[in-house]
Amino acid sequence: MSPRIFFPLLLAVTLQYRGFAQDSAVHRFYVSGYDSLASLIKEPDPESFKKAVFISENAFSLNGMQYDKFNSHIHMLTAVIKAWMTANPLKNYHYSDSVNFQKNYAIYKFLKDTIHLIGKDQQVYNLLPYTYDFTDFAGNKDWGYMFVTKLLATKSGNCHSLPYLYKILADEIGASCWLALAPNHIYVQNRCGKIGWYNTELTSGCFPIDAWIMASGYLPLKAVQSGIYMDTLSNQQAIALCILDLAKGYEHKTHIYSDGFILKCCDLSLQYFPLNVQAMLLKAETLKRVYLWQAKMKDKSSAVTYREMEKLYVELFDLGYREMPEKMYISWLESVIKERDKYSNKQVREVIREK
């Protein structure tokens, strides 16, 4: 029997010991979310990522959200972006990707700059930019701080919700962009016909060069070469991040590791995104918790659990993964603000000035 089949069957036996009923509302909502994401990721379309984000967040809220309202909010934002594009046409840029560049720049402006709107009553309305929220930026105390719905409600988010919203808006207006990963971080990669690839950083609202991403000190060349960081994610891989979010939401909601749900989510995420190191790490840490309990209970299957856990930790190390302390991460984020001129991609700024 393969480990991926063995562990869910084995670990379900420990469920009663942990005092968590299989038919609880939390478990049912999360199983429903898993089933929806498993279906969605098979053949994704331009709206699949938006739906995947909603499914993950709705499970955490125990089905307390309404997709129609969420979707209407997104449509309202895209209407503003399209209106801004009409009022600010791209000039002096004669490459074949001019429309795509214009769309991406409009999304960036909407998220990170003040947008002035003139209403039918001729009154000027100012839409303030979305800001970075350093409060529980990793969702350690409240997983809800990672949500796009939280970002939409408060206009403040983090390196999880801001790039997620960027991609959702890009998908809505037909703009090409790609999510990319760095240690503890998600950002956006774009391609311009004139200058090639460039980075869009939404925490600080700038276009940093690759050197800033490498400057964290926790991104060895090996990690880039292996493909775990600084690579563009496909639509399926982006949805795989949402499946991992589902697992993390379940972890925060229940603190249950022994019923096989988290492991099942990690396996599904890794099926479509084999280099998802965060899924590998969560799976390894989940197996570690299970192993410690099994060893305490003198369960003979603990040896099997240990071997799979050890294999994952070794694989993470071989891929170049290194854990980045939170203080170092904050310092790294602040560096792109304090040293904007040093890390800013001047070529992007020159293209923008050509408008």
Image (cartoon, rainbow, N blue to C red):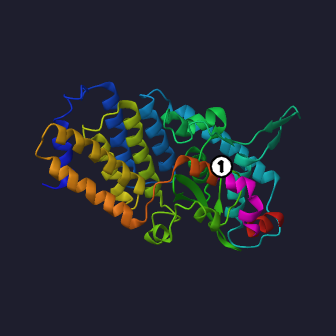
- Going by the numbered disc 1, the residue's amino acid type is Thr
Q: Quadrant of the C terminus?
A: bottom right
Instruction: Work out whether residue 302 can be spotted.
Output: yes
When asked about the image quadrant of residue 293, the answer is top left
Q: Write the residue at 36% across / 48% down.
A: 282
Q: Which residue is mark 1?
A: 203
Q: Is residue 189 left or right of residue 301?
A: right
Disc 1 packing (10 Å; few <14; some 14–19; many ≥20): many
Q: Where is residue 145 drawn, in percent x and y?
A: 55, 36
Q: Could you tell me what secondary structure mostly forms the magenta stretch? A: helix
- The image shows residue 123 at horizontal and vertical percentages of 88, 33
Q: Is residue 116 left or right of residue 9?
A: right
Please say if 186 is above or below 144: below
Q: Quadrant of the N terminus?
A: bottom left
Say if the magenta span includes residue 339. Answer: yes
- Camera-side residue of 22 and 299: 299
* Residue at 41%, 41% in the rendered image: 248
Query: In the rendered image of this protein, does residue 242 appear above or below residue 307?
Result: above
Q: Magenta span has 148?
A: no
Extreme residue toward the right, this view = 122
Residue at image coords 21%, 56%: 307
Q: Which residues are magenta?
A: 333-346
Q: Position of residue 18 (x, y in %)?
A: 24, 29
Q: Is residue 163 visible?
A: no
Instruction: Say which quarter of the image contains residue 257.
Output: top left
- Residue that appears at 69% across and 44% down: 79
Secondary structure found at label 1: loop
- 101 or 45: nearer the eye? 101
Horizontal arrangement in the rendering, residue 214 relative to residue 355 (left or right): left
Residue 33 position, x and y percent, is 37, 38
Q: Quadrant of residue 104?
A: bottom right
